[in-house]
Image (cartoon, rainbow, N blue to C red):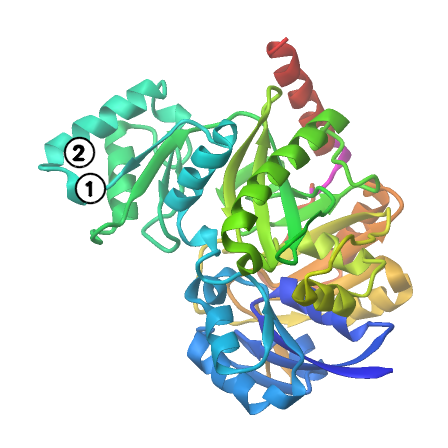
Amino acid sequence: MESIGILLVSYGSREVAMADAFINSDQYGVELYIIDRQNNPFNSKIAKEYAVVSDLDIEKICNFAKKFENRISFGIVGSEKPIIDGIRDLIEKETKIKMVCPTKECAIEGSKVAQRLLFQRIAPKVNPRFKVFNPISYGSSSELLNDIKDWISDLNGIENCVIKPDTPGFGKGVGVGGEHFNTFEQAYNHFLSIYGGEKNNCVIIEERIDGEESSYQGICDGRHLIHLPETRDYKRAYDNDEGPNTGGMGSYKAESGLLPFMSETERKNEIEIENEIFNSVIKEKGDGYRGFPFYDAIMHTGKGLKILERNSRPGDPEIINLLPILKDDFVEICLKIIEGNLSNIKIDKKSTVVTYVVPDIYPEKDNKMRRVHLEDAYKLKDECKDSMRIYTASIELRNGKTFALSSRTVAIVGIAESINSARKISIKGASSVKGKELRFRTDIASEQHIAKSISHMKRLRNSND
């Protein structure tokens, strides 16, 4: 068996799932060189060389890669920050290591304005109605205020608008009318929070879209785009889609690869649009899109789709639904991405359900360390054999003990022939994670939730007949 070294830049469960897929290669003896955000008990145990870089600074990551350059064949990055910061550009300039991620120029999730303008040029039908505001360009605050009022009025009021920062990490983030603000004064305050007072920092106000959301993921080798099966993410913190948005409390994939509320025609239209966008950008940037550059939050409206946002990395948790059921070797997939000859990917026709166990406070943050026990969960995993996976996330190993931090703690994956069977395995696994002040959503991929989505889509389609 051929030996191969892989650099993995890790943030949470998504990268642990990657690591698990790598070390289970049938074709290669894998040595992992892992940079992690914190001392992850899974990664630190399996890594050939391991280091913690809490801020995922790309200079520090590059210095780590240089030490083992002669042992590493390629690198891969899961989270957005290093990609947006230009980790591929830096490492490929300073070392001979090829990276499986887009270049800084192609990391379009770094600017929501750039996304909207790109779609407007290539496929305007996927954009909701939107307007870009650059407060620095206005002569006075009253002029800005009146322009915002007029645009929100054009969108039929506060409840029908969404306010977004151009770049990640400003103020309160994305705000939704009727949820994060109910009056114009509240909306304007949210706008100012997002603006942050930075020169040339823009804010987008766009129409709120009614529909059912899915996650599209595509893998690119610089020449070809491979469409992965559909997944559904659950963003709200609590059951029944209540509470604030989170990074994702769980997700599911159906055995067919098509979500239950979607039609074959809707999937076909989605693929056509993604190909249309891809064929345009690939002519301009080509190899810059190598990796997982097309992870789109898509809203199905009954009369076409809208892209809510595009990311330049694999989804968390959505890629976790797919990695455990790859029929092709993940190492070989990455090598083909680098070589530019990835023509297809085989994925088992099974259902998967991901449930995240999180601290009670999530998505709020604190500095508290919560003791967490995974022994029962791993024992259950051994009993379930290939039908369960456990991927540790915002969890830290200290003096032989594991502690949950303030973000998502651990992802439990159920794998089965049907969504409902996979869900039962995932829920059982989540219940076996022991610790105080931890919780999980109990309705991820539930029959009731799926039936509600199906009914909603039927109403949307009928309203447009």
- Magenta region, residue range: 444-448
Q: Which disc number belongs to residue 144?
A: 2
Q: Is residue 275 above or below residue 458?
A: below
Magenta highlight: main SS? loop
Between residue 332 and residue 357, name the one nearer to us: 332
Where's residue 81, x and y in %? 46, 63
Contact check, label 2 and label 1, Cβ < 8 Å:
yes
- 69 left or right of 1 in image: left
Amino acid identity at mark 2: Leu
Residue 65 highlighted magenta (yes or no): no
Q: Name the residue under label 1.
A: 135
Looking at the image, can residue 128 be seen?
Answer: yes
- 155 left or right of 192 in image: right
| Mark 2 element type | helix
- Which residue is located at x 58 percent, y 36 percent? 298
Where's residue 127, x and y in %? 47, 31
- Which residue is located at x 14 percent, y 38 percent? 138
Between residue 418 and residue 297, name the one nearer to us: 297
Q: How crowded is mark 1: few (under 14 residues within 10 Å), some or many (20 or more)?
A: many
- Nearer-N-terminus badge (2/1): 1
Amino acid identity at mark 1: Pro
Farthest residue toward the left? 140
Specify the quadrant that holds the N terminus: bottom right
Residue 447 highlighted magenta (yes or no): yes
Where's residue 216, x and y in %? 64, 43
- 109 left or right of 9 in image: left
- Which residue is located at x 56 percent, y 55 percent? 286
Q: Residues within 10 Å of mark 2 (few under 14, many from 20)?
A: some
Where's residue 315, x and y in %? 61, 53
How far apart in space, not on screen, are marks 2 and 1 (Cα)?
Answer: 7 Å
